[in-house]
Amino acid sequence: MLSSPVHRRAWALLLPVLALLAVTLPHLKQGDFRTDTGRYAAVGLQAWRDASCFWTPHLQPTVPYFNKPPLVFWIHGFVLHAAGVSLPAARLPSVAAAALCVLLTGSLARRLLGRTTALVSGLVLALTYEFFRRTREISLDLWQLAFMLACVLLVVEGTRRRHSAWLFALAGLPLGLALLCKPLMALLALPLLAVWLAVTGRAARGLPLLGTLAVALAVAAPWHVAMAVQHGTAFTTAYFGNEVAARTLGRGRTEPPWYYAVEMGQTYWPWLLALGTGVMIAVTRASSRRHRDGLLLAGLWAIGWFVALSVFPDKHPRYELPLYPALALLAGHGLVRLPWGSLRRCYRRALPAAGAVVVAAGLLAAVLPLRVQAPPDSNWASVLDWLRTRSNARVFAGALSTNDEGSYYLKTGRWPKPFNGRLRDLPDDGVLLYTDGLMPHAGSDETVLFRAGPYQITQRRRTPESGR
């Protein structure tokens, strides 16, 4: 299979994708719709079931969801609508996004650092735990990263051609799609690319990036403008105020600036040593001019995103995703250029073989009865089973997280109705579903009908004083 240059180029890109599939596809149906996945899957599915909830995503048929743009909801919702509600249907688009990231990273490495580095960098990214584990959830960050990498690849290709303005303009298309995944953050790709062009002595080639920006805004602006016109300050306050400004100012969750340094030190193994080697090679310029340009791009991208994420007060491990392709390029370059000849030759032979071993191990894991994720919450399953025995009851969310509300919709096809009124207004056939720790909570004028773990179902207490 490796007898011709074409085959070698193909396998340099495809083997890392196969390794990714080997660590993501086995037992894809294990686990549950946890955390954001329950909410995002419900929002996306409802968009395809109810046309009025398509352009404006909704948490409930009457509650617009202004927090995020709709593209990822449309993608995952379509698969869930077409294939039926299941964990594999919810997760397969994330696997596809991760595979696209691996392919694009390998393509960048092949253009900037050579075919061997492309193979090794692709394997490093595919086998980075904090990267591939995001395929077990609906990840807005994975899709945003895939579209940003497509933008970067087109810009890099544009720098290699004389008449390249059209490639720079075309790069705005995936960048605009990235802006339809998460608010605004994808725009950071443009100043980082501009700095790279300036540092590599091609500052004049950065002018077409204005065309990239124009096309990106043309792609992303229609949805944003339409939402602002249709919903006014309700949208702008929630989207630009709560999601962008409030998070930037640290009004919600805040973590110290060294959060990601600690995270990377704890989780980026075994690639951390290879990353150190790649950084050393880049700093000492022990590489060709062509390779230095690639290492500069990887270094600037990693530093730019690391600083931006560290300054941003709201920090989560999933936000690290934009770092991993750049780190994979540096680590891959370090691995194939280790200073010890015999060890370098060992790596060059062993890493492709290791990729094949991972693929074989993935096939074996797929047929073995392994438990790779915790089973669904038995308490929540008990709640749903109890409610199924009382199908005539109208379920209201007394105090329920939006993720549980989304899970309820996925499992039953109905949303628990929001309830913000007075208890005496609760209909006779209505029950309230609570989660401990959320406010409000059940009071003395309610009868507890069922309890399982943190969940409880109550009904308005009937007393002689309350009348009917």
Image (cartoon, grey):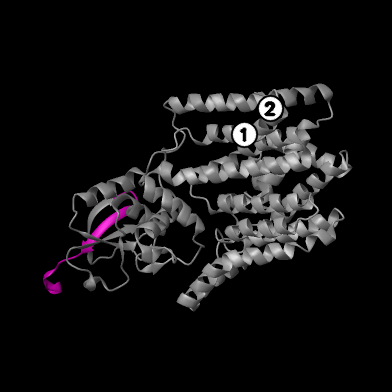
Could you tell me the amino acid type at mark 2?
Leu
Residue highlighted by disc 2: 351
Residue 201 is left or right of residue 442, and the answer is right
Is the C terminus in the top left, top right, bottom left or bottom right quadrant? bottom left
Q: Residues within 10 Å of mark 1 (few under 14, many from 20)?
A: some
Confirm whether the magenta stretch covers residue 223.
no
Is the N terminus in the top left, top right, bottom left or bottom right quadrant? top right
Residue highlighted by disc 1: 14
Label 2 to label 1: alpha-carbon separation: 14 Å
Please indicate, yes or no, whether residue 247 appears anywhere in the rendered image: no
Residue 40 is left or right of residue 310, and the answer is left
Residue ID at (81%, 30%): 338
> Judging from the image, what secondary structure is the residue with disc 2 in?
helix
* Residue 420, picture quadrant: bottom left
Could you tell me the amino acid type at mark 1?
Leu
Q: In this view, does 226 lie above or below 205?
A: below
* Residue 204, picture quadrant: bottom right
Q: Is residue 12 above or below residue 395?
A: above
Q: Look at the image and give the residue range highlighted in magenta.
A: 452-468
Please indicate, yes or no, whether residue 180 appears anywhere in the rendered image: yes
Residue 248 at what x, y percent from top left? 62, 66
Can you tell which mark lies on residue 155?
Answer: none
> Judging from the image, what secondary structure is the residue with disc 1 in?
helix
Residue 369 at what x, y percent from top left? 41, 26
Q: How crowded is mark 2: few (under 14 residues within 10 Å), some or many (20 or more)?
A: some
Confirm whether the magenta stretch covers residue 467.
yes
Question: Which residue ends up furthest to the front in the rendered image?
Answer: 163
Marker count (numbered): 2
